[in-house]
Amino acid sequence: MTKERTMNLPSADDVSEPGYNLSLGAILIETGRLSPEDLDRIRDVQEDQGLEFGEAGIAIGVLTPEDIQYALARQFNYPYLARESSLLSPELVAAFEPYGQRAEALRALRSHIMLRWFTGEPGHRALVIVSPARGEGRSVLAANLAIVFCQVGEKTLLIDADMRHPRQHDLFQLDPSVGLSSVLSGRASWNDAIRHIPDLVDLWVLPAGPKPPNPQELLARGAFNKRINELREDYDVIILDTPEAEGIADVHIVAAAAGAALVIAKKGKTSLSGVGNVAETLRQVGVNVLGSVLIDA
């Protein structure tokens, strides 16, 4: 794990430089984190003591470092959600805690994947997240990974291809009545099923939809593979969540359509042999296994 990043507080002059849409003060007032009266107090302290904006606000107790981080993220169009104003799951740490250690680890993983797979080539735009068994953190990692890709301006689509035990609709608070199963069964269009997440500008999510009695057969139809190829033209990054790999063939169909996979293991739960077996099986069907990720919590 990397250390948490150090925050550099901007000066009053900095926040009026070209390239900033709003000053820190305006953003904080707009989002209810600062009152106009307290903004005047901060300006008085800045003038009297020569402090930077953030330092002055923190010194008089009307702002916190988290308030300044939030405003900076808004200035630089960096999607970052406030827990108190969002209904999304707190498990989406990349959205709620972008400066914490877990988010730093996700960004490091993003860099690794971009070097290994997401190189801009049309055939290298989809990736499945797999794990041997349930309860190993696969869905949460897939969701957070999609968020860190959208945070760097990559147009990102997260697909919940786990039609047996789906989770993405819960994490993003989406209506589960329409999704991948609806599309593959001909009951809805792709445009109707894919949802934009407004607070995370470059992120779209396709939930799994109603649980079908025949998920493997739905995925095996040519429409799934064909549509994944078409979606590569519309999105920079496509992340696919999957069911557990052990004993369920859905994963192989989804991974073969994507072309690449990341295998997840949970500390104290997943066996090394389980990870190795999943990776080898995927390689046998022509999938590029980028590596494995150990989740320790």
Image (spheres, rainbow, N blue to C red):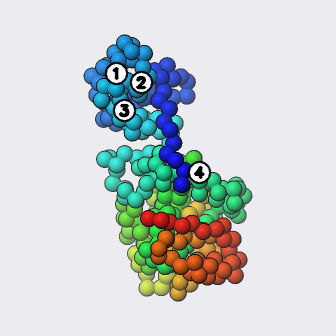
Between marks 4 and 2, how big is the CA–CA gap? Answer: 32 Å
Q: Residue at x 47, y 39 (%)?
A: 73
Between label 4 and label 1, give the one nearer the viewer: 1
Q: Residue 99's x, y, as percent? A: 47, 45
Which residue is disc 3 drawn over? Answer: 28
Occupied quadrant, residue 166: bottom left
N-term mark: 3 or 2: 3
**Residue located beneath label 1 in the image:** 42
Pick whichever of labels 4 and 1 is earlier in the sequence.
1
Quadrant (top left/top right/bottom left/bottom right) for the C terminus: bottom left
| Few, some or many residues within 10 Å of mark 1 (<14, 14–19, 20+) | many
Residue drawn at x 31%, y 47% is 84
Res 126 label: none
**Residue found at the very far top of the displayed protein:** 48
Check whether the beta carbons of the residues at disc 1 and disc 2 lie within 8 A of each other: yes
Q: Considering the numbered disc 1 on the image, is that residue within a helix, a strand or a loop?
A: helix
Q: Earlier in the sequence, mark 1 or mark 2?
A: 1
Mark closest to the chain's N terminus, 1 or 3: 3
Residue type highlighted by circle 1: Ile
Gap between marks 4 and 1, in whole Å?
Answer: 37 Å
Q: Gap between marks 3 and 2, in whole Å?
A: 12 Å
- Residue at label 4? 154
Q: CA distance from mark 1 to mark 3?
A: 12 Å
For disc 2, the marked residue is: 53
* Tag 4 secondary structure: loop
Left or right of 223 on screen, residue 175? left
- Using residue 43 as the reference point, say whether residue 106 is left or right of it: right
